[in-house]
Image (cartoon, grey):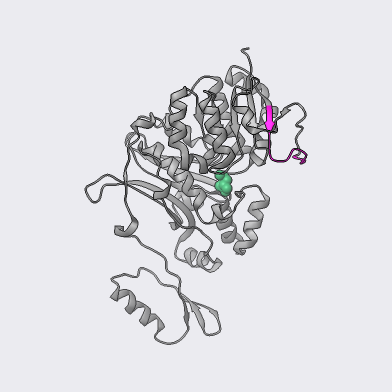
Amino acid sequence: MAEPLRIALAGLGTVGTGVIRLLDENRALVARRAGRPIVITAITARERSKDRGVDLTPYRWVDDMGELATADDVDVVVELVGGSDGPALTLARETLGAGRPFVTANKAMIAHHGAELAALAEDTSAALKFEAAVAGGIPVIQGLRDGAAANRIDRVYGILNGTCNFILSAMERDGRDFADVLADAQAKGYAEADPSFDIDGVDAAHKLSILASLSFGSQIDFDGVEIGGIRKILAADIAQAQALGYRIRLIGLAEIDGSNGHTQLFQRVQPVLVPIEHPLANVTGATNAVVAEGNFSGRLLFQGAGAGDRPTASAVVADLVDIARKETGPAFSMPVGELEALTRASSAHRINKTYLRMLVADRAGVLAEIAAAMRDAGLSIESLIQREVADGTALI
Ligand code: HSE
């Protein structure tokens, strides 16, 4: 068998230790698939002495992460440190600048700096791979970049944050409170270091902007994503939605909008009422699902674990197998110079159904006043449910 592919691992959190376990448990199988063994040689993290439940003694500990970009015993750098800027970005620039392949799970960094890093990778002919950055263990990057490469795709959408989906489906199933379920998701290792990135929709927006670029052949435009989260959703909203035949899911949607005669890019993350019979309504727990509509393939549905150590490690090692096989290519499916700069479509002109929750004084005439206000605003009511929530107060 050929010489091993030697890996440096920067970051030994949930995903990093997952990669160590995977390369240990599936060592022989991975070597057969890759055509050569994949071995970790060097490691680094913030704290050396922390007990991570895996044996780190076989690997060379490096204090200065920057050393990995040029170390002699390293062929590929795997970055699992996180953060859009700072040490992760410095390491990416130095590694790719040195012509060395770079694998990352860092969606924030790719969303903000993906074009720059992909251009650098092209200049030095180094691979830049980020399967683990979007939707955990689902091979959606490879699916869109390679499997669906022959298609024009005008819409991509889905459930892109495992923490939010875990929270929403647990609230739905058990009627539990938001904060209580969030603590549970954090304990399971799904949540970001800063969980506000999860619950406020930022993490899903990072992933959506990457998917949009891959799907449409457009430049990444993270700042163009309209972002909403799930922080304000009450157990009562979930119950109301259920009574109306819907489930609430945090959905990221990106589409090509040609409605005003120009090709524009629309991107939004927001809680959506998904009809109970839609496949996305039945995606529960930390599962993610991505739907892409190809003009020849038709509707593609990718579904699987969107967070957690084992699924994310699976995606990281898939990239390493590609590198070992020398199956690389442009990070965003086409050279950076080919990616189109699309102007932004705003949601202002879009006509949607929406859900409104109102807490009102439970007295005669309230409903009539609401209906009149909506009529005056040109809004049509499809369904309306009123429940008493406390003495003298009703939820509509
Ligand atoms: N915090 C992320 C999520 C992890 O909950 O989906 C995977 O990106």
Span colored in magenta = 42-52
Which residue extends farthest bottom?
A: 364
Q: Give the x, y percent position of residue 100.
A: 54, 24
Position of 6 with respect to 142 (left or right) is right
Q: Is residue 329 visible?
A: no
173 falls in the magenta region: no
Q: Give the x, y percent position of residue 22.
A: 66, 31
Q: Give the x, y percent position of residue 210.
A: 44, 41
Q: Give the x, y percent position of residue 337.
A: 35, 31
In the rendered image, the vertical position of residue 185 relative to residue 2, given as above or below: below
Q: Is residue 98 visible?
A: yes
In the rendered image, the vertical position of residue 309 relative to residue 146, given as above or below: below
Q: Residue at x 41, y 72 (%)?
A: 384
**Quadrant housing the C terminus:** bottom left
Q: Residue at x 43, y 30 (%)?
A: 119
* Front-lying residue, 295 or 385: 295
* Front-lying residue, 236 or 244: 236
